[in-house]
Amino acid sequence: STAKIILQPIEKILTKELRRHFSSQNKKHANILQTQKFVPFIERVEMRRAEAKRSIIVQVQSAQSSKELQSYCDSIGTVQSMFHYTSGVEPLHFIIVEFEKESDVKNVLQASSQIDHIEETMAVPTQSHFLWFRASNRKLTKLKQNKSTKLLVQNGTNIVGEDEIKEMLTNCETVSDQLKKLHKITKLNDVGTRLRFLTAVQVEDALSGIFPNARAFPFGSSVNGYGKMGCDLDLVLRLVNDKKDSKDSRLIFHCKPVVGSERLVTQRHMETVGDLIHLFLPGCGHVRRILQARVPIIKYHQQLTDVECDLSMSNLTGVHMSDFLYMMGEIDDRVRPLIFAIRKWASAVGLTNLSPGRWISNFSLTLLVLAFLQKPLNSPPILPSLNKLTSLAGPKDQYVLDNGITCSFLRDLRKLNTKTQNTESLESLLCEFFAYYSQFDFNTKAVCLNEAVSITKPEHTAMYIINPLERGLNVSKNVSLDEVERFKNEVRTAAWTLESQENKSRNWGLLSILESKKRAVSNGSINSKNNRLMEVRALFDKERQEANFQETNSKNLF
Ligand code: CTP
Ligand code: MG
């Protein structure tokens, strides 16, 4: 039946066939990951993980070392592809070497040496996918000259500068093109993704001796399709894997009993994992333990991949949330460019901030955009409600986590055969987003993606966005009343700025709202100039809200 309850869910979807498919079709994967074809979230994550497992990162003198490195690596295994990137202000050069098989990496690691390094620096004798390439005394004539180079990317992690972004957006034809361009040039690229999965595999490998089933699942913007170059890596570390447990086995491992509350035990374990990362893992530093938070995390910086990590041990919901956000982005190709533009705008006008606090987070902002796309003001919906996806969930989509939270919704979009009738341009969706939230009644309403309607707030907090997977939680609980006011003012300013543009000035279109702080438009003038537009939209909204209110009141939500 579809109500089957499954614990420790992520791995179970990996059937034997899929595993075989993964190991034999590496080359095909590389192509699949590059194409526009829909790949379900978990399959995509597994492909990336397999790719990381058969890759190493090698520090080199410069990109010029690639031929020699390729030749050396090919003498042990078969190199599939290589990617060059730099890290740091005085850049260090690295090459990701992807082999055809995971066993090639095992052989390479076995053939690698620790000795010189340890004698010189008294370093901790660890082995990992992170290596450096020693200069050779032998002559280069040994290189096979006829072999074509497999180095695919130069400067794989370079972040496009603000001036460059501005120039590219200025040269676009339309506002919609600006949104597409911004998305294209700032989104996390292939090398950035590879580095994040290699960073995750490092933690897994380090723990594998004592916890052979340890898995570090990447989630959040690194994998949900809303990450930009340089984004943080959210990781959830799981030590158990029920998949391999055989109920029939008569030999059971002795395991140490744990003493104390679950939260205390998790905190203690995380402290130890934090020490391990700090003391033993090459490249990892600046370890900070934030163990008193609702979800305790360890923050650290992996210098060799230049990735900032947030590692938790108890939050699998985040992985399913990432799946949900990923799917929403895959449903319509306007979703991601719109979210990138709105995140960029929010950062430019100071609504979001790198550190957490009483302001709106990128995650909350993303949910606001998705909620808007579920019911734009005067056009058909672009995205379905989560309830609709839940109703379409098949047996393979049924997940109940060990904390009792249900994360069952359709994962394979190829089975969602309804296509939106909405043909609005990105430009008009952007304008409508601002108009929509400038009149949203944050005082009494909560945003709800499950029903795709706004509902009456269940409790008094300045901004209420129902967590779609844990409906008792408010995602924007942290946001203060002041910040909601600021949000409302900024969306009004943006709506007005975009609507009042007549021709292409210097900072036209999207650029005009990325600079809107400097323009300092007063709220009074916005309201008077924008009155007619607002009146028409208010009428639409009132009708909708009344309809929604009746609909949601008839459902017992909490
Ligand atoms: N998350 C959640 N509930 C919250 C906060 C976060 O489920 N109240 C999950 C979401 O899946 C989110 C992920 O944790 O995507 C990571 O959160 P965060 O790092 O704050 O957001 P990102 O989406 O990763 O965006 P950013 O690029 O700002 O890191
Ligand atoms: Mg994140």
Image (tube, helix red, strand yellow):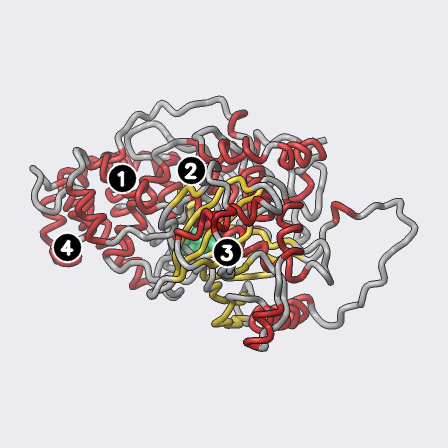
| Left or right: 425 as drawn, with respect to 470 | left
**To which residue does mark 1 refer?**
181
Determine the CA span between mark 2 and mark 1. Answer: 17 Å
Q: Quadrant of residue 370?
A: top left
Closest to the observer, 348 or 33: 33
Q: Secondary structure at mark 2?
A: helix
Label ID, residue 329: 2
Dot placed on the residue nearer the N-terminal end, 1 or 4: 1
**Label 4 sits on what residue type?**
Asn
Q: Nearer the viewer, mark 2 or mark 1?
A: 1
Residue displayed at 46% across by 52% down: 95
Q: Quadrant of ligand 2?
A: bottom left
Which residue is found at the position 58% from the left and 35% from the top? 26
The local secondary structure at tag 3 comes to strand
Indicate which disc residue 208 carries. none
The quadrant where residue 10 appears: top right
Which residue is under mark 4? 523
Q: Is mark 1 within 8 Å of ligand 1?
A: no
Vertical side of 71 occupied by 4: above or below = above
